[in-house]
């Protein structure tokens, strides 16, 4: 059993993770900045290793007027939106695979989500679903880094770096999943994740 729509009677709440709460949100934002820096260093280092002749040229451009900023801004916005769509699509594909039903997609404020609110997913499938965008997009990005024309390198790097920074919530969920027994169940509401384990007393969210 990968997922069930009925929480077994002997299961109890172990952990509730909510990005609606101010304290976790602030901490996640700080960790996201750290991931942004680490992913940038990783991708630029890989670029210099894989394509040393293109590393300098890939990020060289000139700004001659205020109007030249518009393409840069549009590229950043497009890369961010595209990354969010692909990131949540990874979650959705795995939720669909494990539950057999179409996941719920949506936007709340400045973030997008894919969720399976009517399902309780076992620990390992839920862990795979949580980490799929970070692992999948990073590996695809590294592969493409060696193949795409040099003019596409900055956009590719931006997508991979932004995706890594945006995966901080997924890593938060993964951390707590790894602290659960294999038969734990997770319920994803989009901005709130509840983890349940057999016979455990209620635990307050952090």
Image: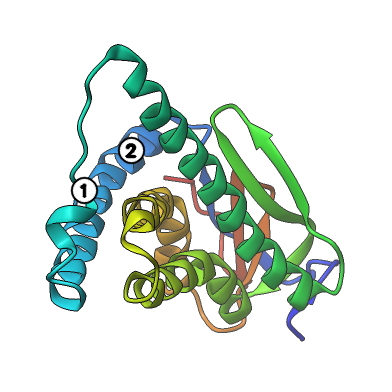
Q: Report the disc number at residue 29.
A: 2
Give the residue at x 53% y 32%.
20
Q: Earlier in the sequence, mark 2 or mark 1?
A: 2
With respect to residue 203, does 67 lie above or below?
above
| 10 Å crowding of disc 1: few (<14), some (14-19), many (20+) | few
Give the residue at x 19% y 50%.
37
Total number of numbered discs in the rendering: 2
Report whether 83 appears left or right of 186. left
Q: 62 or 162, which lies in front?
A: 62
Disc 2/disc 1 C-alpha distance (Å): 27 Å
- Residue 68 drawn at (x, y percent): 33, 22
Give the residue at x 22% y 25%.
63
Tell me how the rendering is colored. rainbow
With respect to residue 50, does 29 lie above or below?
above
Q: Report the disc number at residue 75.
A: none
Report whether 169 appears left or right of 36. right
With respect to residue 183, does 92 lie above or below?
above
- Residue 36 drawn at (x, y percent): 26, 49
Q: 172 or 67, which lies in front?
A: 67
Q: Secondary structure at mark 1?
A: loop
């Amino acid at each position: 059993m990968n997922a069930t729509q009925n929480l077994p009677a002997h299961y109890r709440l172990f952990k509730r993770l909510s990005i609606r709460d101010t304290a976790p949100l602030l901490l996640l934002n700080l960790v996201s900045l750290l991931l942004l820096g680490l992913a940038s260093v990783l991708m630029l280092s890989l670029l210099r290793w894989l394509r040393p002749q293109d590393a300098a040229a890939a990020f060289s451009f000139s700004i001659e007027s205020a109007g030249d900023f518009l393409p840069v801004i549009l590229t950043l916005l497009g890369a961010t939106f595209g990354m969010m769509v692909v990131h949540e699509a990874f979650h959705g594909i795995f939720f669909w695979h494990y539950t057999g039903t179409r996941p719920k997609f949506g936007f709340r404020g400045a973030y997008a989500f894919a969720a399976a609110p009517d399902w309780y997913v076992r620990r390992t499938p839920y862990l795979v679903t949580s980490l799929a965008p970070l692992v999948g997009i990073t590996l695809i990005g590294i592969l493409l880094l060696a193949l795409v024309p040099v003019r596409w390198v900055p956009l590719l790097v931006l997508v991979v770096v932004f995706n890594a920074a945006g995966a901080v919530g997924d890593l938060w969920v993964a951390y707590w999943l790894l602290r659960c027994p294999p038969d734990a169940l997770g319920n994803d509401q989009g901005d709130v994740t509840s983890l349940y384990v057999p016979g455990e007393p209620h635990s307050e969210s952090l």
